[in-house]
Image: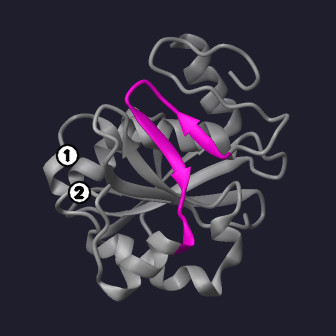
Amino acid sequence: MTGSFPRSGACFVSSIFPVAEVVTERLVLRRWTRAEIDAVIAGGRLPHWAVDFPAEGDRVVAGLMPDHPAWLAEYGHRLVVERGSGLIVGSIGLFWPPSSGGVEIGYGIVPSRRGHGYATEAAQALTELAFTAPEVHTVFAKVELSNPASVRVLEKSGFRRWTTPTDENVVELRVTRAESDDVRASG
């Protein structure tokens, strides 16, 4: 519902102004700071992190950010902040820029906060943000089949299985702008 009030549990995203934060019912998705990137790369700790943040995926993304400045922009990578505690409990991001109208999404929630629906809530919100970019028509993710919880997160977020790439342990899930609009309209 870009530019209008969201349904219950949805996020509010405006395509009029650059989005610094995406706020959902229980989460804030905000951009990484340089200090946070440096701390993750250096193996440090900051007081506003959940005890088990960063996870391995967060360390990989932080290490790659200096080579991918678009990941720090409006449609890039974000930290997942638990509104109730103010703690960073994971990260989520779009691997910007899109290619042929498609952009990949990736995410991770620390083990101490899994099972609460945070990954689904964050994936839905960031997908909605992705579709505010006129050049994005499809959001996709590549998930290892050995991670069925991640497949469920995407399916609950409106993604559907698209293909099984040459690696038989990986499945690609996608959602198009039209499918996302249909899910929001029926929600």
Kindly identify the amino acid type of the residue bearing the numbered disc 1. Arg
Residue at position x 23%, y 57% in the image: 110
Task: Give 137 or 133, whichever is nearer the viewer.
Answer: 133
Residue at position x 48%, y 34% in the image: 158
In the rendering, which numbered label is found on residue 150? none
**Quick one: SS at disc 1?**
loop
In the rendering, which numbered label is found on residue 114? 1
Residue 11 image offset from top left, x and y in percent: 55, 27
Residue 88 image offset from top left, x and y in percent: 34, 52
How are the colours assigned in the image? one colour
Image quadrant where one finds the N terminus: top right
Kindly identify the amino acid type of the residue bearing the numbered disc 2. Val
Residue at position x 18%, y 63% in the image: 52
Q: Is 37 left, or right, of 13 in this rendering?
A: left
**Quick one: SS at disc 2?**
loop
Residue at position x 69%, y 58% in the image: 102
- Magenta-span inclusion, residue 104: no
135 over 16 or under it: above or below? below
Report the residue marked by disc 2. Answer: 110
**In terms of image quadrants, where is residue 128?**
top right
Marks 2/1 in contact by CB < 8 Å: the verdict is: yes
Where are the magenta residues, as a range? Answer: 20-34
Q: Is 172 left, or right, of 83 in this rendering?
A: right
Task: Give 86 or 186, whichever is nearer the viewer.
Answer: 86
156 over 175 or under it: above or below? above
Task: Give 124 or 158, whichever is nearer the viewer.
Answer: 124
Residue sticking out furthest to the front: 47
